[in-house]
Amino acid sequence: MTPDPIHFAGSDTLSLRQLDELNGLSKGTSFRWFKACEAELSEGVDYFYLPADEFPELIDSLKASGQIYASTRHLLLLTRRGYECMRARSTR
């Protein structure tokens, strides 16, 4: 089942939790993929980084809906392009 996208800044995005679940991966795997290819990604195009002190209401609502991990502090949302880059890199 495909997760419902999180609409942010005019883009459909997915959280790291959604990506882990979509791919049947353990918690943290998508984050490790992201860190491995972060230098190749462009913030605002491939991903959005939302600091907790700037987006507390959004982060709390996404925790309540189960779309992000309950332990999430700062939110990372991946666009389709960012996700495709991560997936390609993870299979190299």
Image (tube, rainbow, N blue to C red):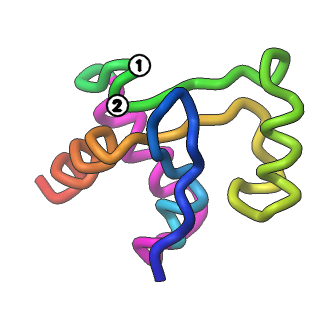
Residue topped by disc 1: 43
Please name the residue shown 72% across and 20% down the image. Answer: 51
- Please name whichever residue, 90 or 52, is drawn nearer the observer in this view of the structure: 52
- Residue 36 colored in magenta in the image: yes
Q: Position of residue 46 (x, y in %)?
A: 34, 31
- Asked whether disc 1 touches disc 2, contact meaning CB atoms under 8 Å apart, the reply is yes
Separation (CA) of disc 1 from disc 2 = 6 Å
Residue topped by disc 2: 46
Q: Is residue 92 left or right of residue 1?
A: left
Q: Which residues are magenta?
A: 22-38
- Residue 43 colored in magenta in the image: no
Q: Position of residue 83 (x, y in %)?
A: 33, 48
- For mark 1, give the secondary structure: loop
Q: Position of residue 72 (x, y in %)?
A: 76, 43
Residue 35: quarter of image:
top left
Residue type for callout 1: Glu
Q: Is residue 78 left or right of residue 60?
A: left
Instruction: Say few, some or many: other residues with alpha carbon within 10 Å of mark 1 (under 14 / 14 to 19 / 20 or more).
Output: some
User: Residue farthest to the left?
Assistant: 92
